[in-house]
Image (tube, helix red, strand yellow):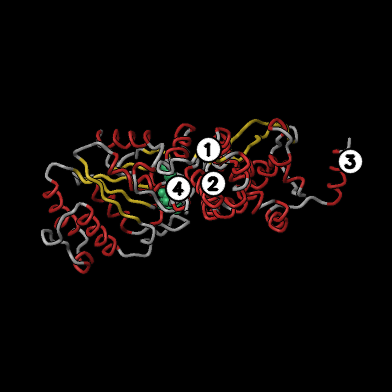
Amino acid sequence: MTNLMTLIKNPYTVGRPIFKPENLFGRETILSFIQEQLTSGAKVTLLHGQRRMGMTSFMNNIAEYVRLDEFVFVRLSLEDKYNKSLDKILYDLARNITDELGISRTTINIPTQEDLKVEPQDFVNIFLLQVYQQLKRKNLVLLLDEFDMLWDNSCQEINSFVYFLISIINLQEKLFIILFVGRRESSLEFIQSLFREVGKLPHKELGLLDKSNTIKLVTEIPREATNYRYDPDVIEAIWELSGGHPYYTQLLCYNLFQQARNKDKWNVNYQDFQGVINKSLEEGEPAFVSPLEVLSTQQKLILSAVAEAQKRATNSDHIVSPLVILEMYDVKVMENLIEELITAAKHLVDLRFLEEIGEQKFRKIKVPIYKVRIELFRLWLLKQHPLERQRDLINELFPKKSSLQRIWDMAFSNE
Ligand SMILES: Nc1ncnc2c1ncn2[C@@H]1O[C@H](COP(=O)(O)OP(=O)(O)OP(=O)(O)O)[C@@H](O)[C@H]1O
Ligand SMILES: [Mg+2]
């Protein structure tokens, strides 16, 4: 007889955005932040975070979660809109608004794309006015996902939809905007400067989940698999490896569930947990690679150097600065390079890749020591980007120590 448990669908989600509120965890604080901003009249609010941190999932659930009767929400992803004309984006937005608000297309006059091309203001003067009428006393909140896809890497070529929004937002009493950004490293300051005539934008980071929400995610999602259980040390180990990253947590749990189903063994112990780490590192590749897209080659090398510093340390008190590690790879860390590397590492701290954990002496000055913030990500760096395999890149990017200097250093290190 077939065991019914083996037919159960894997309840965890890996990669696809989440649509069901009961499967979204740990976003209460950021949700209250949004409620506060809207009720206090903030016209444009900015949410930012690393890629794959759950932006789209959060955005999908805002309408369900926000308990403010006077606001309605409409989503638009700008992921593929960089090369699109203003009239095309406005036309798509008008149709999204109509459909998401459940307004029948027969009761509203949506300007054609040709009309919007001749007169983009028709979007406001013809279309939005009708929407406001239908909404009666309610306000319209646009949720714009991947907003920072509207300009190029050098922040020079900016899609005119950005300027259009800036020009209308303060004049439209019933219109509010929430921007979701995550891709570009300079997004925050750049967006603030773009929107300076609107005012300073309130902003908040969408980041890692705390421990109790991570545990809830792990234990509450398989609600229907009633026999499925984790030993307490497995739950602790998931937390330690994923660090509260929602995607990485789901990734580990998905693989654990799959393994349990394959083996028809529904009590997950620590050994089972160890059995899925490698598979998770392989299958989660996109979630490890895409946050790196915003980094320079030099910053990526520093990340790998920090991962290696942790690997070489026998305990966390013995972790050395990435500068020391780079020296081991024959990099000539001159004074100006020290400064450059520390600035780059500080940037990695700001972007939440690294955590500063102390300092040490390096050539008479004190330099910071770091660790990689998420352990699973560190394991992936060691597997896919070990410094050992990047010697050519290191040689290309950094001045090399002379052989004389190397002999000199070796003499010192033996002292
Ligand atoms: N709050 C959450 N609770 C539970 N799981 C989550 C949460 N947020 C994200 N996830 C997990 O992370 C995965 C990615 O989520 P999502 O697509 O929303 O991220 P994203 O930041 O929009 O990614 P991208 O940078 O690719 O646009 C989901 O498949 C899900 O497994
Ligand atoms: Mg997304």
Q: Secondary structure at mark 4?
A: loop
Coordinates of residue 263 in the picture (x, y in percent) = 56, 50
State the CA–CA distance, disc 1 to disc 3: 53 Å
State the CA–CA distance, disc 1 to disc 2: 10 Å
Q: How many marks are shown on the rendered structure?
A: 4
Camera-side mark, 4 or 3? 4
Q: Residue at x 64, y 46 (%)?
A: 302
Q: Mark 2: which amino acid?
A: Leu
> Dot 3, how many residues are within 10 Å of its Cα: few (below 14), some (14-19), or many (20+)?
few
Earlier in the chain: of badge 1 and badge 4, it is: 4
Q: Residue at x 19, y 39 (%)?
A: 70
Q: Mark 3 touching mark 2, by CB under 8 A?
A: no
Residue 256: give its label. Answer: 2
Q: Which residue is mark 3?
A: 411
Q: Secondary structure at mark 1?
A: strand
State the CA–CA distance, disc 4 to disc 3: 55 Å
Residue 346 visible, this orientation: no
Q: Which residue is mark 4?
A: 12
Q: Quadrant of residue 317?
A: top right
Q: Mark 1 touching mark 2, by CB under 8 A?
A: yes
Q: Secondary structure at mark 2?
A: helix
Q: Mark 3: which amino acid?
A: Ala
Earlier in the chain: of badge 1 and badge 2, it is: 1
Q: Residue at x 59, y 51 (%)?
A: 281
Coordinates of residue 269 in the picture (x, y in percent) = 59, 39
Earlier in the chain: of badge 4 and badge 3, it is: 4
Q: Mark 1 touching mark 3, by CB under 8 A?
A: no
